């Protein structure tokens, strides 16, 4: 199915409030899990409930069209200090459309106990400039050996990397509430309002 048509089917009736796309690149599911939680928290936040906000999580590989939405949250897993190629490609491929929208970026990567390394991924600053992002957040990730391929497992063992789920759900919730407040104040866009809902 064409990505735009798929997005139309996933987007609820446009007579409701603003619609937010949460587009992510995830290698082993941890970043996709953050995206799913963001979708839920954006909608049930006080601002989200007040304005009837609707959100949907779509992998960047499906090339969702930003023009179908009022705002975009774009995130990626981080490996070797960089976003996944699919997320970088999506940001540059859709740069013109993203620049016309409120955009937020997040990275999923640090593991182990705090404090995490303070540095952002190498490519986030130029990507934020390309899409005109309002802000960028780094969230801890998840690392389970049974989800890794042989090469990745060898690196984890060599580095003695800590394993477990380190995702900070309260931090994700706080950020979702901030985004929802910003989105609630947006003026409706004609292009987004014309998107048909399902059936």
Image: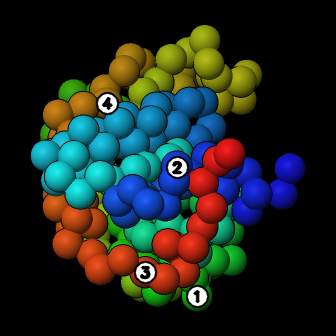
Q: Is residue 7 left or right of residue 77?
A: right
Nearer to us in this view, 101 or 120? 101
The residues bearing labels 2 and 4 have C-alpha atoms spaced at a distance of: 29 Å
**SS of the residue at dot 3?**
loop
Q: Between label 2 and label 1, give the one nearer the viewer.
A: 2
The residues bearing labels 1 and 3 have C-alpha atoms spaced at a distance of: 16 Å
Residue positioned 17% across, 34% down in the render: 170
Q: Give x and y (percent) for residue 99.
A: 47, 85
**SS of the residue at dot 4?**
loop
**SS of the residue at dot 2?**
loop
Which of the labelled discs sits on residue 167, or is there none?
A: 4
Residue positioned 24% across, 38% down in the render: 44
Nearer to us in this view, 21 or 188? 188
| Of callouts 3 and 2, the N-terminal one | 2
Nearer to us in this view, 150 or 103? 103
Is label 4 in contact with label 3 (beta carbons under 8 Å)? Answer: no
| Of callouts 1 and 3, the N-terminal one | 1
| Of callouts 2 and 4, the N-terminal one | 2
- The 10 Å Cα crowd at callout 2, few under 14, some 14 to 19, many 20 or more, is some
The residues bearing labels 4 and 3 have C-alpha atoms spaced at a distance of: 34 Å
**SS of the residue at dot 1?**
helix
């Amino acid at each position: 199915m064409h990505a735009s048509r798929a997005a139309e089917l996933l987007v609820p009736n446009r007579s409701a409030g603003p619609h937010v796309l949460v587009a992510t690149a995830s290698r082993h599911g941890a970043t996709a899990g953050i995206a799913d939680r963001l979708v839920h928290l954006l909608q049930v936040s006080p601002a989200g409930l007040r304005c009837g906000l609707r959100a949907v999580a779509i992998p960047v590989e499906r090339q969702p069209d930003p023009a179908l939405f009022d705002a975009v949250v774009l995130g990626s897993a981080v490996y070797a200090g960089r976003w996944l190629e699919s997320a970088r490609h999506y940001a540059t491929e859709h740069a013109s459309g993203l620049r016309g929208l409120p955009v937020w970026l997040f990275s999923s990567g640090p593991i182990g106990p705090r404090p995490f390394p303070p540095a952002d991924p190498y490519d986030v600053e130029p990507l934020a400039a390309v899409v005109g992002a309002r802000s960028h957040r780094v969230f801890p990730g998840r690392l389970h050996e049974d989800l890794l391929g042989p090469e990745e497992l060898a690196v984890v063992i060599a580095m003695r990397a800590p394993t477990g789920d380190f995702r900070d759900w309260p931090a994700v919730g706080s950020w979702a509430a901030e985004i929802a407040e910003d989105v609630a104040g947006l003026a409706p866009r004609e292009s987004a309002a014309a998107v048909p809902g399902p059936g």
